Image (spheres, rainbow, N blue to C red):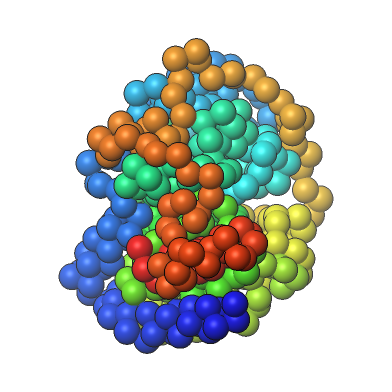
């Protein structure tokens, strides 16, 4: 079995060596990276949804207000969000889209509430929607959702498209300054933010992805089962993470990570940072790219992390920064359930069918979606399914 791993290693290195992605230093190069991102994620620009929101309730946080929002992105794809609104000034306020990661609590996770409260009290509005399949949207599907791939799209692509819809919504609201709309998020939210940098760079004022930016090459070689939202078919031949993030230059970009992150080694993050520094130097704004390496784990937990990200956003929006101090207490319990999905709601796979026009087929794991073609089918039954799934997963990053 070791020879199959060795063959995969050769495939990975060959794909990386032959990747011909242009550096994001010209309008044409950025447009090409954007095209490749849509192509790899197997989505179309015209699928980008028009998000509509309705305020259900409002809560007073002292220096800010929190509105509970019910939204619909595509027809019958529902969700809920928290919109944090400053009381400081009359607006239009700068605003941030917070893309959260793999938190079952979704928008109610304490870390997300803390980050949003810090920014809202300092004068920045924050929208925190539940990601598909998480928070109050778990029935929509996400974990072990392989059937969207059988329709001809990707789980990550659908999540990114919806996030682009949220970003459009913020830019359309008169109470927000459309020239000062940014985005951030940790882990899976850092992943979404990163892709958006390569797909909406014309409109993003600043971005602060954390807990994910590193390299697709390292991600591909992980020998643990990845969430379906972290499967990127054929990406190694298309582009690297630095290409997506570099599209944002010369606008401000903070890449952040915990020094104790067990999933993404610090050295890989530093390598990404150095390459982005070169991109920003070429763009004539070397100081616009920053790195924050906090003393802590993968998740947002420490004051250094919260204040580091918050103050980057405030400083770049021209607002006074905050002295590091006690963190605000979350307003809502993490297990809060306020807005169940309507009865006519559809799930992620039904959405994939609707957008692509293709019917689903059963898929229990990645082997059913991207069978490892470098392994003879007659040998599949001779190895554990988990091993076969890891081999299929690695191969999917090379061969769509």
* Residue 20 percent across, percent down from the top left: 28, 80
* Residue 171 percent across, percent down from the top left: 35, 40
Seen as rendered, the residue at the extreme left is 28
Judge from the rendering whether residue 263 lies leftward or rightward of residue 54; answer left or right.
right
- Residue 239 visible, this orientation: no
Task: Name the residue nearer the viewer: 140 or 60.
Answer: 140
- Residue at 32%, 84% in the rendered image: 18
- Residue 345 visible, this orientation: yes
Seen as rendered, the residue at the extreme right is 326
Judge from the rendering whether residue 398 lies leftward or rightward of residue 4; answer left or right.
left
Q: Work out which quarter of the rendered image holds the N terminus and state it.
A: bottom right
Judge from the rendering whether residue 67 lies leftward or rightward of residue 363; answer left or right.
right
Task: Name the residue nearer the viewer: 86 or 256.
Answer: 256
- Residue at 29%, 76% in the rendered image: 21
Q: Work out which quarter of the rendered image holds the C terminus and state it.
A: bottom left
- Residue at 73%, 41% in the rendered image: 110
* Residue 112 percent across, percent down from the top left: 65, 44
Q: Quadrant of residue 237?
A: bottom left
Seen as rendered, the residue at the extreme front is 378
Seen as rendered, the residue at the extreme top is 343
Judge from the rendering whether residue 196 lies leftward or rightward of residue 144; answer left or right.
left
């Amino acid at each position: 079995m070791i020879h199959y791993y060795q063959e995969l290693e050769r495939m990975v290195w060959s794909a990386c060596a032959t990747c011909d992605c242009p550096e994001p230093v010209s309008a044409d190069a950025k447009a090409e990276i954007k095209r490749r991102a849509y192509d790899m994620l197997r989505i179309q620009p015209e699928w980008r949804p028009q998000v509509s929101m309705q305020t259900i309730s409002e809560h007073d946080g002292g220096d800010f207000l929190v509105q509970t929002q019910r939204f619909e992105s595509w027809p019958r794809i529902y969700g809920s969000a928290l919109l944090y609104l400053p009381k400081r000034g009359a607006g239009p306020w700068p605003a941030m889209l917070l893309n959260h990661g793999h938190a079952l609590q979704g928008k109610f996770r304490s870390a997300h509430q803390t980050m949003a409260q810090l920014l809202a009290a300092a004068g920045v509005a924050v929208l925190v929607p539940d990601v598909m399949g998480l928070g109050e949207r778990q029935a929509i599907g996400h974990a072990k959702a392989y059937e969207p791939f059988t329709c001809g799209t990707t789980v990550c692509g659908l999540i990114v498209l919806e996030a682009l819809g949220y970003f459009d919504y913020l830019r359309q609201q008169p109470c927000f300054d459309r020239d000062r709309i940014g985005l951030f998020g940790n882990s899976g939210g850092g992943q979404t933010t990163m892709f958006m940098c390569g797909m909406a760079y014309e409109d993003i004022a600043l971005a602060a992805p954390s807990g994910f930016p590193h390299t697709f090459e390292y991600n591909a070689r992980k020998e643990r089962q990845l969430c379906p939202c972290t499967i990127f078919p054929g990406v190694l031949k298309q582009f690297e993470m630095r290409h997506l993030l570099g599209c944002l230059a010369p606008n401000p970009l903070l890449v952040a990570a915990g020094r104790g992150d067990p999933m993404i080694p610090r050295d890989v993050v530093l390598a990404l940072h150095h390459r982005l520094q070169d991109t920003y130097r070429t763009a004539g704004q070397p100081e616009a790219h920053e790195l924050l390496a906090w003393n802590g784990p993968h998740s947002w937990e420490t004051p250094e992390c919260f204040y580091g990200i918050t103050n980057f956003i405030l400083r770049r929006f021209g607002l006074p920064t905050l002295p590091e101090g006690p963190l605000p207490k979350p307003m809502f319990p993490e297990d809060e359930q306020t807005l169940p999905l309507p009865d006519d709601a559809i799930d992620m796979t039904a959405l994939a069918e609707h957008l692509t026009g293709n019917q689903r087929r059963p898929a229990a794991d990645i082997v059913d979606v991207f069978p490892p073609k470098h392994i003879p089918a007659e040998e599949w039954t001779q190895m554990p399914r988990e091993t076969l799934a890891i081999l299929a997963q690695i191969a999917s990053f090379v061969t769509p």
